[in-house]
Image (tube, helix red, strand yellow):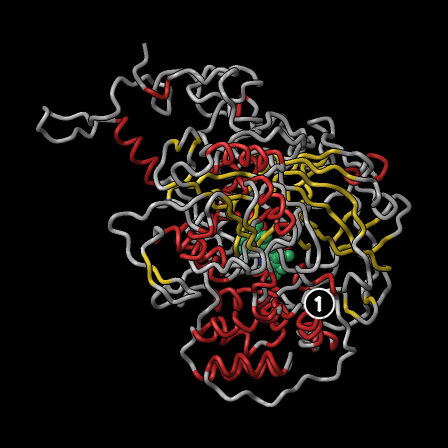
Amino acid sequence: MPTNPAAVPPESSDEPHVPGVPSTVTPEVAEPVEPREPAPPKGDQSGPATGSPTGAPTGLPQEAVAQQGEWLTTAQGDRMHDTDHSLKAGPRGPVLLQDHHLREKIMHFDHERVPERVVHARGAAAHGVFTAYGTASGVTKAAFLAKDAATPVFVRFSTVLGSRGSADTVRDTRGFATKFYTEEGVFDLVGNNIPVFFIQDAIKFPDVIHAGKPHPDREIPQAQSAHDTFWDFVGLHTEATHHTLWNMSDRGIPRSYRMMEGFGVHTFRLQNAAGETTLVKFHWKPKLGVHSLVWEEAQLAAGADPDFHRRDLADAIEAGAFPEWELGIQTFPDTPEQTFEGIDLLDPTKIVPEELAPVQPIGRLVLNRNPSNYFAETEQVAFHVGHLVPGIDVTDDPLLQGRLFSYLDTQLTRLGGPNFGQLPINRTHAPVNDMLRDGMHQTAVHQGVAPYRPNSLDGGCPFQAGAAQGADIEVPVPLPASRKVREAPESFDDHYSQARLFWRSMTPVEQEHIIGAYSFELGKCYEQAVKERALLTLAHIDERLCSEVATALGLPAPAPDAGSDDGLVSPALSQLGQEWPTEGRNIGIVVAPGADPDGVRALREAVFAADMVPLVIAPAGGTLDGVTVQRTFATARSIEFDALLVAGVPAPAADALPVRDAKTGVRGTDIEPRLALLLGEAYRHGKAIGGWAGAEAALTAAGVPQDAPGVVLGGSGTEVFEQLTTLLRSHRVWDRFPAAS
Ligand code: HDE
């Protein structure tokens, strides 16, 4: 019998299943079940038996599974009896060169890494399905956008600046890249969570990234824009102003990947079956709304849980709270000028406000399956803006044009050669019959003798398709009669009007966050000239923004230079002012020994019933009064919870430090300091807080005023929870932020 513990057969299907893990791409929401820590990867109980120790990862075809059989082998299939000792000349003697297993094992380990992505290195991904409404069929012939077409997808979210091991919650733009495995070939929508970009021409990309990455001498700071080289660049390169302002807004610190918008950024060209063309911008709209962390939370999470977003995405999918987005398009007539309401559609630093061109929903994306192997899927996936299907084409946006080169080129280094398209995650679901041959990591065994055209030896195969066979035929767009130049169009010179539009569209509390972000980032710079130049840029956006940041920096504010604007406001840019679904939110339940255990049980049921996740927090792990504890005072941190409920007052530890009641100033030892920290942070971060069964004392000791907005006391746990749910629909208790009052 095998002695290797990995050889234990896969768990049987009647064992408790990981909550909500689906075995197909069907976007059905599973019944919420009691949460537990993420379980190790399991075999797909519904798929074919593989006889492998780990079972076939969910959804993968059997031939894609590396492990077969129960016994440990070398890479050549030679069965091994010992992988723990090198072959030696005696137990105390030297290691023998003839030990092939040792050399193979270490050689392979030494080469396990591939270069990380030069940008967007830190990411997390999930599988899902996209179902089209058919509403885009009038403007595009793309088959996957026809009514009810369901297309498998793989979506990778990322930060831009940080290395692969950096924290998730840093202030940065987020990548939102979607691979549609359509019947007509792969379509990649490689977008961001911010609709504009720092630069208007791809040739500036190395500059902006060199400026944003850590300083080349000490290689710090990691994954941050709060340093001199970044602000040096954006101060000198004013076309970055609009995007920088978005980054300094709450969009730069999303609460969750599930709560981000996505944008294709560039304008694309669609073509319908009649050959008519339309210019469009793509938008992803999250079902849960657009929500952000507050800056202190983002900083705390970077230490307490650097995997915050990655964990959130995987946990939500595992629990059956499948993230959802609607894909929408803004459409514009394809005129020779390629402008709309005076906005240059080829300028990637500009948006078209939704109030001028509404976003029309064209389909629904549901992410319902976690990757089973990070490297094979999330790391090796290769997106490309040039992966297009008939009916979708690029425009002459100079940023997009440069990307068309970069995304092929970068894979040669990162994935080691030209055959990365054969990696399972990158394989199209359409039949492939190309004439590309050989090269590094070739895994296909091509047939025939004539990989050239024309040929007679392979019967003339493969044949070229025409329009009738669905060939992707370029849209014959007329080119402007012009001259060869290194120049940008004049309209690209407007660097401020849309930054002003964005600023004006923010609510007071969002504006306060922006002021705080600039004050923090510029406060981390050392060079006086860099800060002064940044203030000059702010003077072009708004006088108060500029003067408040100047005050925070201890510098004089330059004279305002707000230009002459139309004063347009786009309410769609604000994240506040609406109510959103609360599915998948984490509810922390702080319990003390003897504090209404039946009430806690009923509360947990109520939280599950509301499709949210109850997490019981107690002084120690295990169970308390028969209730399973998920977090202890040592492992819980406020960042994890969207709302907190407190039942009773935990007894202070014998060595507890005295804490100060923030309201009365009185010091006491009537609450555990870590609980005081938990409640105090949740309060400061504008989270809904509730309590019953004697919670008042704990809240008072933690400095949480009982009459403050968003603090609910009394009744039963379930009654309090109902009120917290209403508060959660607005994401935070905004009235607790000074600017909102
Ligand atoms: Fe990228 N970008 N980019 N980018 N980008 C890459 O490609 C590049 C730009 C975006 O999850 C790289 O495979 C240039 C805009 C995402 O794997 C690289 C320019 C937008 C991802 C590259 C841009 C993006 C990348 C690095 C200026 C939003 C991650 C690894 C012309 C619309 C995809 C790779 C993933 C990745 C180049 C600008 C989004 C080097 C030259 C604008 C989401 O090819």
x then y, percent, for residue 720? 58, 45
What residue lies at 55% left-to-right and 29% top-to-bottom? Answer: 33
Callout 1 secondary element: loop
* Mark 1 CB lies closer than 8 A to ligand 1: no
Answer with the quarter of the image where residue 493 lies.
bottom right
What residue lies at 60% left-to-right and 42% top-to-bottom? Answer: 719
Neighbour class for label 1 at 10 Å: few (<14), some, many (≥20)? many
Answer with the quarter of the image where residue 634 lies.
top left
Q: Is residue 647 above or below residue 664?
A: above
Answer with the quarter of the image where residue 427 lies.
top right
Residue under label 1: 350
Q: Quadrant of the N terminus?
A: top left
Q: Quadrant of ligand 1?
A: bottom right
Most foreground residue, 304 or 152: 304
Q: Quadrant of the C terminus?
A: bottom right
Q: Is residue 612 above or below residue 339?
A: above
Position of residue 22 in the picture relative to residue 98 (left or right): right
Q: Is residue 412 above or below residue 374?
A: below
| Whether residue 276 can be seen here | yes
What residue lies at 65% left-to-right and 54% top-to-bottom? Answer: 730
Position of residue 473 in the picture relative to residue 249 (left or right): right
x then y, percent, for residue 65? 49, 25
What residue lies at 44% left-to-right and 84% top-to-bottom? Answer: 528
Q: Which residue type carries mark 1? A: Lys
x then y, percent, for residue 535? 55, 82
Position of residue 694 in the picture relative to residue 220 (left or right): right
